[in-house]
Image (cartoon, rainbow, N blue to C red):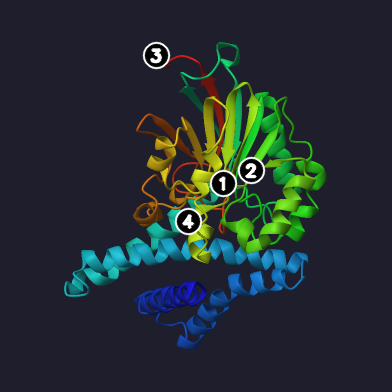
Amino acid sequence: MFLITVITIWSLMHLYAFWRVAKLPFLLAVPRWVFWVMGLLFWFSYPFARYLDRNGFASELARGLELLGAAWMGVLFLLVTALLVSELVTAFGLWKGAVVPARTGFLLLALVLSAVGIVQGNRPPQVEHLEVPMPQLPPELDGLRLVQLSDLHLGTILREEWLSARLAQVQALKPDMVLITGDLVDGNARHVKRLLPLLREFKAPLGVYAVTGNHEFYAGLEESVKLFRDAGFTVLRDQNVEVRPGLVLAGVDDLTARRQYGINHKALEKALAKRPPGACVLLSHTPWEVEKAAQLGAQLMLSGHTHDGQIWPFSYLVRLSYPFVGGSYKVKGLTLHVSRGTGTWGPRLRLWKPAEITLITLRARSVN
């Protein structure tokens, strides 16, 4: 049902965009069949690229097709949004004199925003600094530095060169721990296996810890977990570990994927039960069940998944399912930080904020 829904929406967006654009006067000279052939080719681009990838066609041609298709996905979203706004401005065509100027103007706006978004999406992730008070943290651990990476989406688009640059960024921050909050794999674990030598370079004195995201489920959960472990990461699957006396790290398999697959294992209860005393940091790819995490004793929760909407104004739709869409929040004494994502899913396109690597400093006292 999920796949049928996605394909239906994808198809309707193409039909609407090409139907409206084809009616603009300065494009009437272009034969109609050209528009529909173009629409069909654009419609096929991303799904066909993913099909090739799934079936082992990892050529540069397939990668180029995926890059094109992914970029088009972002442009199409902005184009459809802009055209819908033009419908509102013209009262759905009732204000006839404004139809052509409005559609033309909003079409150009969508193209400009697409160009800005592509530039923004290809910028290096920005380091965000966060200080978190944890009264239960032992004084000797005050100032502990955690680096959170989330939603790297490694695969056909984000590969060796990109990951190598992220490794340099992390090493420059000199973290005590590196925490990966899911979706390290995009859709095919086979591509990420080639990156194992680089992934093994992510090191920290207190270790590298990871939890799964929904894309690890899609790529094959057990294969993805094995890949994490082969990289030297400690994978937390509904469990907790004592990193140092007085500091506990807990983690759960992704909550979004569990809902999609109908899996209900009371993940947070298992992860936070029977833990040693002290400050507790929870890793959960999806920022759900935040109040429950607070009630169960977590003081800091690190999540991702939402990409902060990635392409404005998509963030407003994301907020319908994920109220904590990006940034830091206080919930019943718990600090929740939802990363914008270190990489991008689909299009290398972002409006307005760049990607993120988060440097978190733990404090054994309140932050002034």
Residue at the image position 54 percent from the left and 83 percent from the top: 37
| Residue 304 showing in the rendered view | no
Q: According to the image, label 3 marks what residue?
A: 368
Question: Where does residue 188 sit, x and y in percent of width and height?
Answer: 70, 61
How far is the residue under mark 2 from the one under mark 4? 38 Å
Q: According to the image, label 4 marks what residue?
A: 114
Kindly state the secondary structure of the residue where label 1 is placed. loop
Q: Residue furthest top?
A: 139
How far is the residue under mark 1 from the one under mark 2? 6 Å
How far is the residue under mark 4 from the one under mark 3? 41 Å
Name the amino acid, label 1. Answer: Val
Q: In the image, which is nearer the foreground, mark 4 or mark 3?
A: 3
Q: According to the image, label 1 marks what residue?
A: 252
Labels 2 & 3 near each other (Cβ < 8 A): no
Q: Residues within 10 Å of mark 2 (few under 14, many from 20)?
A: many
Kindly state the secondary structure of the residue where label 4 is placed. helix
Residue at the image position 47 percent from the left and 33 percent from the top: 298
Labels 4 & 3 near each other (Cβ < 8 A): no
Q: Is residue 304 left or right of residue 55?
A: left
Question: Where does residue 125 sit, x and y in percent of width and height?
Answer: 58, 38
Question: Where does residue 78 sit, x and y in percent of width and height?
Answer: 42, 61
